[in-house]
Image (cartoon, rainbow, N blue to C red):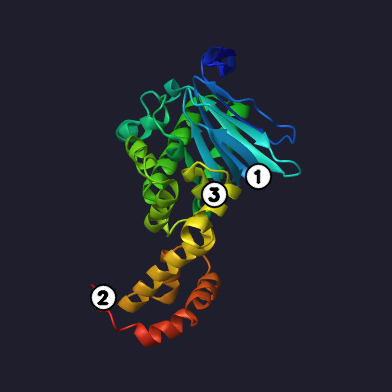
Amino acid sequence: MDEKKGILYFQTRSQLNHEFPFKIFRYSSHLLKQSLHMHDYVQLAYVRKGMCHHRMMSKSLTVSQGELFIITPGTEHSFSAIEEKDFELVLIDFAPSVLDGLLGPMKDALEPYLTPGGASAAHSWLHVGKTKQTLVLQLLQEMQEEYEAKEPGFEYSIRLSLVKLLMVVEREYRKIGRRPPNRMAAAADRQPIEEVRRYIHDNYSQDIPLEHGAYLANMAPAYFSHVFKKETGQSFIDYVNEVRIERAMELIRRDSLTITQIGFQVGYRHLSHFIRTFKKRTGITPTEYKKTFGSLTPSN
């Protein structure tokens, strides 16, 4: 441990094993209150359950189950517990050299997550959808078991699981249309609320918690909620629902998908929630809307 730019600086030579610079551990203490720090290795943090605070690159975010961060070398960050809130973090520390020779055709796609400054703040954070959380937890469990048992070949097994986990994360980023790191700087020049609105229109089919919008706008969640409503005239959740229902109405008019398929496609994971939200915004159910408008727009 050293100091750099006036903050704590953790180094591979003192924190990780020289022969296999990798470790995985879990943290759940209500006393957790890290000082702002950085490391010369990569840290992957996954919120397994509960809620806590994460500060990274001057942004503060209340994080909860399913949130995943990749903290690249030299990135300032810290985690802290929230009073009376349970949580469990799974943390992986590793030197990029652990994956030398294993990235293959994914080398160009994955290297930004392993190098200093390679991934900007918004591209270092991912809300893992429920459909992928089981796989992420399975890979983390496999690595922890290998790390603790240290059977012959455990290093190779961990490397393979780590590469697979990074591939899952990279695919999730691409799936939601997240901009690549080298384009995020230009996005930051636009007005923050307008940028969040644009993000909603581009990614309405995915989970978009309020904390995600706040993070993109570089605001505390409560303040972001206030500013968003002031500038748009709607709450964040109402705005997301409006975008989704408008898209659902368009798909219904095309008359090429079932109501269930449309609900899922516009971001609702439960049909009952979709029907309830649709009726609240339009006054009729999706089925009733389909009977009236379902054949007005020919399918392409």
Query: Upstream in the sequence, badge 1 or badge 3?
Result: 1
In the structure shown, which secondary structural element does the residue marked by tag 3 occupy? Answer: helix
Q: Amino acid at mark 3?
A: Phe
Q: Which residue bears the numbered disc 2?
A: 299
- Which of 3 and 206 lies nearest the eye of the viewer? 3
Q: Which residue bears the numbered disc 3?
A: 224
User: In this rendering, does residue 128 appear at all?
Assistant: no
Q: CA distance from mark 2 to mark 3?
A: 39 Å
Label 1 packing within 10 angstroms: few (<14), some (14-19), many (20+) = many
Identity of the residue furthest to the left in this view: 300
Q: Quadrant of residue 46?
A: top right
- Which of 180 and 14 lies nearest the eye of the viewer? 180
Q: Quadrant of residue 163?
A: top left
Q: CA distance from mark 1 to mark 3?
A: 19 Å
Q: Quadrant of residue 111?
A: top left
Tag of residue 51: 1
